[in-house]
Image (cartoon, rainbow, N blue to C red):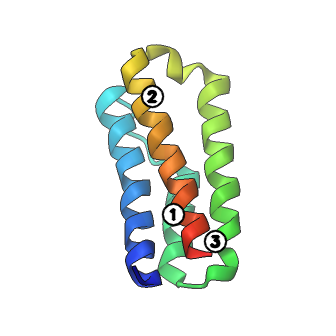
């Protein structure tokens, strides 16, 4: 699979995280770290991709600290963590 395809998958995976949180938790706000990550992908400069990893880790940490995960069932929590892990894997694949 070429890099462009992986970048499209990464973009899609980030959007899936946003959709998941909106649908499962009902959060309708813009997620700044994900929004910035999508902008980095749009730049198509892989030198900035490690910052996506940091932004997603920060985003996940904030969700933990605010207790948002408490409203998820165990199954939904596992689905969410798998989506986060997929983003990390795709970043590694692109780099």
- Which mark is in front, 3 or 1? 1
Q: Earlier in the sequence, mark 2 or mark 3?
A: 3
The residue depicted at 67 percent of the width and 46 percent of the height is: 57
Tell me the crowding category of disc 2: few under 14, some 14 to 19, or many 20 or more residues within 10 angstroms, Cα based: few
Q: Is residue 79 left or right of residue 23?
A: right
Tell me the crowding category of disc 1: few under 14, some 14 to 19, or many 20 or more residues within 10 angstroms, Cα based: some
Q: Is residue 39 left or right of residue 59?
A: left
In the figure, 70 relative to 91: above or below?
A: above
Q: Give the residue pinned by disc 3.
A: 49
Q: In the image shown, does 29 or 39 lie closer to the viewer? A: 39
- Is residue 72 visible in the rendered image? The answer is no
State which quarter of the image contains the N terminus.
Answer: bottom left
In the figure, 5 relative to 79: above or below?
A: below
SS at mark 1?
helix
The residue depicted at 47 percent of the width and 82 percent of the height is: 3
Tell me the crowding category of disc 3: few under 14, some 14 to 19, or many 20 or more residues within 10 angstroms, Cα based: some
Residue 23 x %, y %: 29, 33
Q: Earlier in the sequence, mark 2 or mark 1?
A: 2
State which quarter of the image contains the C terminus.
Answer: bottom right
Distance (Cα) linking label 3 and label 1? 10 Å
Q: In the image shown, does 41 or 82 lie closer to the viewer? A: 82
Which residue is situated farthest in the front direction here? 1
Q: Give the residue pinned by disc 1.
A: 90
SS at mark 2?
helix
Which corner quadrant of the image does residue 72 belong to? Answer: top left
Q: Give the residue pinned by disc 2.
A: 78
SS at mark 3?
helix
Distance (Cα) linking label 2 and label 1? 18 Å
Q: Earlier in the sequence, mark 3 or mark 1?
A: 3
The residue depicted at 53 percent of the width and 84 percent of the height is: 44
The residue depicted at 37 percent of the width and 21 percent of the height is: 75
In the figure, 2 relative to 89: above or below?
A: below
């Amino acid at each position: 699979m070429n890099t462009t395809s992986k970048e499209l998958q990464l973009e899609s995976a980030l959007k899936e995280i946003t959709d998941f949180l909106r649908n499962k938790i009902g959060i309708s706000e813009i997620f700044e770290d994900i929004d910035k990550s999508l902008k980095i992908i749009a730049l198509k400069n892989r030198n900035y991709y490690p910052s996506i990893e940091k932004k997603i880790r920060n985003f996940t940490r904030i969700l933990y600290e605010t207790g948002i995960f408490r409203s998820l069932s165990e199954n939904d929590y596992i689905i969410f963590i798998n989506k986060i892990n997929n983003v990390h894997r795709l970043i590694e694949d692109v780099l």
